[in-house]
Amino acid sequence: MLDNLGSLKRTHRSGELRAEHTGQEVTLMGWVFRRRDFGPLTFVDLRDREGIVQVVFDEERNPTAHSKAKRLRSEFVIAVQGRVVQRSAETVNPNIKTGDIEIVAEQVSILNESKTPPFELDAAKPPSEDLRLEYRYIDLRRQKMQDNLRLRHRLTMAARNYLDRQGFFEIETPILTKSTPEGARDYLVPSRLNPGEFYALPQSPQLFKQILMISGYDRYFQIARCFRDEDLRADRQPEFTQIDLEMSFVQPEDVFNLIEPLIVEMFAVGGVEVKTPFPRMDYSEAMERFGSDKPDTRFGMEFVNLGDIFTETEFAPFAKTLQEDGHIKAITLEGGANYSRKQIDDLTAFVRDVYKASGLAWVRYSESGEITSSLMKNLGEETIRRAAEKASAKAGDMVFIIAGNRDVVAAALGGLRLELGKREGLVDATKWNFLWVTNFPMFEYHPEDKRWYAMHHPFTSPRDEDIEKLSGEQANPGGVLAKAYDLVLNGVELGGGSIRIHRPDVQQTIFRTLGFSDEEARRRFGFFLDALTYGTPPHGGIALGLDRLTALLAGETSIREVIAFPKTARASCLMTDSPSEVSQEQLQELKIKIDR
RNA sequence: GGAGUCGUAGUUCAGUUGGUUAGAACGCCGGCCUGUCACGUCGGAGGUCGCGGGUUCGAGCCCCGUCGGCUCCGCCA
């Protein structure tokens, strides 16, 4: 029934054939995409990676091949030998690249059959995602997925070529490595040879790349798989890929100057022209104006601080907020005065349920110049009018106000801003707004543990002028800024990095600030502290999220669309059915008992 | 850990206030067709309404639970 490949050699890919190939004898191999049967005449669209071409089976010209073609069904794998012929003018198909020509089949070999696929590859609407993930091998045959993975390959190659030209060495670092509690949860791997001990999969190659700098490699990069055992999102997978790099003897400016042309080259691959230099913004300013450390600057609606308007207020919630060092901030929706009570209620529920805001106040500045507000009774018209004025509200606008502690106001008003931007179509989808967010705080305080945590990671260098704030009587970790930076695109964190600590004494101070005893620091990071003492150059680097970058250029909203074999929101693989239970023998060998 | 949302032929979906035999398109199978290209045309097969329980004379529809996909909050140094 089936034919052997034998000595058949493919001469071309289907999608590459053009008018210039007319008259050539070709051998093509691929999948049956569609079949159109007219009795004595049968057309087959043959598909391979490069596209489709029409193959003609004609009973008169070649009865053997024609009768064999009757057996063909969707996704059969075939080899076709035939001649490339020009199509007549009436039969040219302008919708496909190979539409000027067709293949007159002389021989066809059926290399393999296929069951009827669980979904159609050319359906207008792709099937549900769980079905796609279960049959990923078929899903990956779809044009869109092939385009996405091709784009990803070309982006990766662009990065490799660029970094090679800039003198970077691509060096691999271990996947089985040491757990470093701090940061994300580690994926653990039990060691059979050392029962009861575990490797961890790397959250990033952080310490290895720093050690490569200590070892004098000067410029390192890696297309690095990273693992974090945290909950998933549309833009977060348990394993993901970073373009990870590190360089010696640099300041943040040098990193920016390296990355901006890299981005230009990668986005050129994606057909997007990017202008440099990228704007910069301090973290504090980003939080002040947008309530986010990754602001989407494609539209306005920036925060306005109304705290000073309400300093004298007797309205208890506001007075209390200000007394407790909280924030009262507003955003103005142009043309929003027509928002109905129902719409406002929905938004109120949104900020309350999602971001735990205590409420959403509003001031409506109607087209006729009349001002109404949910706060009118509490604050009086005079104060409301001043608030509206400060928020730059004009006739026809609506002002939304949120009061509360700083984090909640930032998150809720920032979330509301993005939601309104989306609902009102304020986002210009043709814009590619890059932004360097700089001068992050070094630490953030976690009241529940009563200790400081590194905002970036514990190896990030504080600014030189802030080092003295770390110790002594006047110690003020909260006021220390870091030489850390994020690259943001359209409100998406594309990457982040920092200048690292290269002095052992500074590193020790940071560990102390984080509440590690010297002994504990040694236990966790002793190898690294030792390495630092053997001539460590000043160094720094950055890592870019390849999945996110590719998704943005592919026009996808989920990174699953640019990953060949992604996991579901519950971190399982529907194709392989992992994770799964293992045998008792395997567990015994590892000396592991399951306690459930 | 929490919230929302979806789950009906192979696929994408419709299914009224709870009421007779659960529909459509595409796909699939068979016939016809010599220029189609999302071929056309005639005919046919195909359903555990995710799963379990409950309410009811009667459940795809209502209630409870559960499983799974997706989205978000927390989490993600």
Image (cartoon, coloured by chain):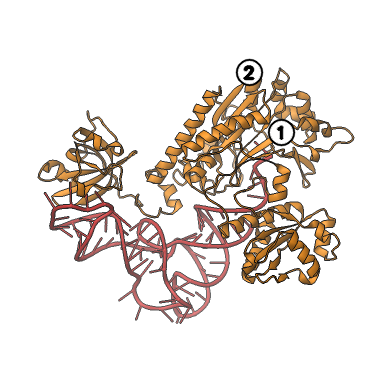
- Callout 1: residue from which chain? A
The amino acid sitting under disc 1 is Lys
- Which image quarter holds the N terminus of chain A? top left
Q: For chain A, what colour was chosen?
A: orange
Residue A567 located left or right of residue A325: left
Residue A56's place in the image compared with A382, above or below, is above
Q: Is mark 1 on a helix, strand or loop?
A: loop
* Numbered mark located on residue A216 in the image: 2
* Viewer-side label of 1, 2: 1
Residue A401's place in the image compared with B76, above or below, is below
Residue at the far right: name it. Answer: A473
Q: Does the rendering let one see residue A541?
A: no
The percent coordinates of residue A198 (x first, y second) are 62, 32
The residue sitting at 65% across, 69% down in the picture is A367
Name the image quarter holding residue A29: top left
Q: Does the rendering let one see residue A100?
A: yes
- Callout 2: residue from which chain? A
The residue sitting at 66% across, 30% down in the picture is A253
Q: Do the residues labelled 1 and 2 touch (CB within 8 Å)?
A: no
Residue B22's place in the image compared with A104, above or below, is below
Residue A586 located left or right of residue A455: left
Q: For chain B, what colour was chosen?
A: red
The residue sitting at 51% across, 31% down in the picture is A159
Name the image quarter holding residue A202: top right
* Numbered mark located on residue A483 in the image: 1
Crowding at label 1, few (<14), some or many (≥20) Cα neighbours within 10 Å?
A: many
How far is mark 1 from mark 2, CA to CA? 22 Å
